[in-house]
Image (cartoon, rainbow, N blue to C red):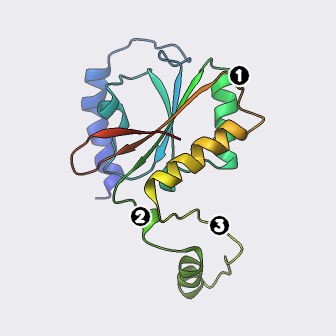
Amino acid sequence: MSYFENFIKANQAYIDRHGTAHLPIKPKTKVAIITCMDARLHVAPALGLDLGDAHILRNAGGRVTEDMIRSLVISEQLLGTHEIVVLHHTDCGMLTFKNEELADFVESKLHQNVHDQDFLPFSDLEASVCEDVNLLRDSPLIPDDIVISGAIYDVDSGHISAVEC
């Protein structure tokens, strides 16, 4: 049996807890959170969020990319968010490689040349948070009145620390 089949079975228990409440499309806190896809990072419980409270946007490393900005424009302009949190985490896989190394590995495994792809690795966790916060602050698509914060989640303790950028 695949994990997906198990997920479908487990969904019944979730349905029983979820109930039939119709939540509004706009997030209750008016916050969008950019974070990593890492499975050790459960953003909602770590921040005390319930279903419908915030937009949680995820990718490898929680990096600000063109697609993240696309999603933020929709979140802000159509769905009323006015605050962004960039949340990176300790022990991130993005700290473990350089673009050239990953491109060589992908080419050896998939026989595809991805040497022109920036996978957005980083070597300094706090600096990566500030880089992404500053990308948002400098983007013409993110209004100046949007509050932007940065933080680091500790995967071992669950502690979240603010990062001043």
User: Counting residues from the N terminus, which is met first, the one under dot 1 or under dot 2?
Assistant: 1
Residue at numbered disc 3: 118
Which of these two is toward me, 113 or 151?
151
Which numbered tag is attached to residue 117?
A: none
When asked about the image quadrant of residue 14, the answer is top left
Residue positioned 65% across, 24% down in the render: 76
Q: Disc 3 versus disc 2: distance between alpha carbons?
A: 15 Å
- Relative to residue 79, is residue 155 depicted above or below? below
Q: Residue furthest right?
A: 140
Residue positioned 53% across, 83% down in the render: 105
Residue 124 position, x and y percent, is: 46, 60
Say whether marks 1 and 2 touch (CB < 8 Å): no
* Quadrant in which the N terminus is drawn: bottom left
Residue 122 position, x and y percent, is: 51, 63
| Mark 2: secondary structure | helix
Which of these two is toward me, 32 or 1?
32
Q: On the rendered structure, is 43 left or right of 9?
A: right
- Relative to residue 137, is residue 6 depicted above or below? below
Residue at numbered disc 1: 77
Q: Is residue 59 visible?
A: no
| Mark 3: secondary structure | loop
- Relative to residue 34, is residue 30 depicted above or below? above
Q: Is residue 28 visible?
A: yes
Residue at numbered disc 2: 93
Residue positioned 34% across, 42% down in the render: 8
Q: Residues within 10 Å of mark 1 (few under 14, many from 20)?
A: some
User: Counting residues from the N terminus, which is met first, the one under dot 3 or under dot 2?
Assistant: 2
Identify residue type, mark 2: Gly
Q: Residue furthest left?
A: 157
Residue 85 position, x and y percent, is: 50, 34
